[in-house]
Amino acid sequence: MYSLEIALGLAAVAWGAAPPVVSPEVRSDRTVTFRLRAPKASEVTVSGDFGKPAAMTKDENGVWSVTLGPLAPGLYGYGFSVDDLRVLDPGNPNPKAGLNLTTSLLLVPGDPPLIYEVRPVPHGTVTIHWYDSKSAGVPRRIYVYTPPGYGKGKAKYPVLYLLHGSGDDESGWTVVGRANLIMDNLLAERKAKPAIIVMPNGHVPRPVPFSADPAERAKAASVFENDLLKDILPLVESNYRVYQDAGHRAIAGLSMGGGQSSRIGLNHPELFGQVGVFSAGLSGEPEAAFKTLIAKKALSRKNLKLLWIGCGTQDGGFERARQLSEWMTAHGTKNVWRPSEGGHTWPNWRLYLSEFLPLLFTKEL
């Protein structure tokens, strides 16, 4: 019996085309072979979350390849550099969603499966919900996760507003972060409370670079806050069965989204009772951002049930994130400080979400 690869190769020859290249090829020992057909290229390398760029070698058919590993179980982003041009892996149908489509995704399965792998458990639903944003003046969309059984019941749910980083869009936490699968698996293990997760677009309506004028950045931050509070919250609360009090409403985000969640969440304790800040510190001083709230004791445990701050020790923002935690503690705002290994990467952000979700919407921490 012919294998699928042989059959595809014969079909390609019949049509006068080169046979398809299998890439990436993940073996049972967790070694991975990357391949790219580029007969006219003079140099090809592969690089990604797994380490330094690796040089590839070309065979007589013009196919470049290299085998790496064994790699630790995980979800990796990677791409090829062809004579200094960064490209996706054309043999891999799983690109990393975001503002620049130059990265492919590779899953090296774990044993037992990782918290963000697909497991044989009940699964929730992710809906792409379009809306007309009056604040931004353009049509926009949110990704909405509803837990298993939502469509068959009448119960209300708490809601988490989950924000992405500067290089991603509203699809990031689903496609790359796998927030839906993390929640599915935590629910199956009875480690989290069922909740709806709303993932908006943090760019309004397009990204504003960090090098932009401070006034422009401040305006963009204000527009996004209005979009979230005046457009998205009413949309969610009129279309989904969610509680509408601060105790059942949380906000969290990574990097840029961590800064947004800290500013919006902590400045609105009447709306958000739980806040998560992943790999992000404030660009300004906490004293200026929260002076009024601290003076009013608005960030007490009565109003803010949970403030969770996490950052990798190799992250450029580690010290600022640590200082935010210490400043909050010094001013009477209890918080969970979670330093971890690694840098400003998705492995940390998936880890943080898997630890943050079980703490949400519980009677006691």
Image: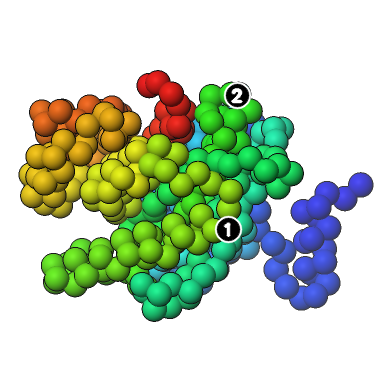
Crowd class of label 2 (few under 14; some 14 to 19; many from 20; radius 10 Å) = few
Judge from the rendering whether residue 26 lies leftward or rightward of residue 282; answer left or right. right
Residue 72's place in the image compared with 203, above or below, is above
Q: Secondary structure at mark 2?
A: loop
> x, y percentage for residue 170?
46, 59
> x, y percentage for residue 254?
34, 47
Residue 313's place in the image compared with 106, above or below, is above
Residue 163's place in the image compared with 315, above or below, is below
Res 55 seen here? no
- Give the residue number, with chain letter if any, for mark 2: 189
Q: How many marks?
A: 2
Front in this rendered view, residue 239 or 8: 239
Q: Residue furthest right?
A: 1
The answer for how far apart the CA atoms under marks 2 and 1 are is: 28 Å
Residue at position x 35%, y 38% in the image: 273
Residue at position x 23%, y 48% in the image: 267
Please tell me whether mark 2 or mark 1 is closer to you in this view. 1
**Residue type at the position of mark 2:** Glu
Asked if the residue at tag 1 contacts the one at tag 2, i.e. Cβ–Cβ closer than 8 Å, the answer is no
- Give the residue number, with chain letter if any, for mark 1: 239
Front in this rendered view, residue 13 or 99: 99
> x, y percentage for residue 248?
45, 39
